[in-house]
Image (spheres, rainbow, N blue to C red):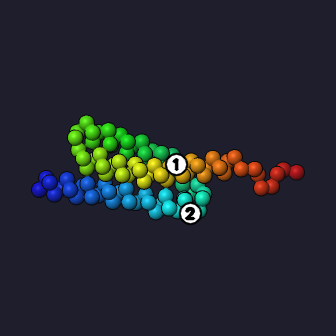
Amino acid sequence: MREIVTYVFGLALLGNAALFVPQALAVWRKKSDEGVSLVTFGGFCILQVIGVIHGVYEHDNSLIFGLGASFLTCGTVTLLTIVYRLRRLRAPAAYPPV
């Protein structure tokens, strides 16, 4: 029974990683950080890295690979958000003050 729960847990973590893909695609397609919370996604990334480190210490491959995949997809959203936010903040104003 323990092996079944471990297997399902690993699949659930991979499902968690897949949930970030639509957000990454939306940010990439729109080329905009609009509506994305950098604090939220940055926080998710930190938690996932902590989970991977815990998995290494506990020799838990489900945590290592599942949260590693989540970090990859969530990190993509975070990185794209940072890139487009910096681009937006550095862009010249559309209507300069008169």
Q: Which mark is residue 79?
A: 1
Residue plotted at (49% across, 53% down): 77
Residue plotted at (54% across, 54% down): 36
Q: Position of residue 53 (x, y in %)?
A: 32, 38
Please report whichever mark, 1 or 2, sits nearer to the chain's N-terminal start. Answer: 2
- In this rendering, the answer to whether 33 lies above or below 39 is below
Task: Kindly indicate the quadrant of the structure image that contains residue 31.
Answer: bottom right
Residue plotted at (77% across, 55% down): 94
Q: Is residue 72 left or right of residue 36?
A: left
Residue plotted at (29% across, 58% down): 12
Q: Position of residue 64 (x, y in %)?
A: 29, 45
* Foreground residue among 61 and 45: 61
Mark 2 secondary-structure assignment: helix
| Residue type at numbered disc 1 | Leu
Q: Position of residue 80 (x, y in %)?
A: 54, 52
Residue underneath mark 2: 29
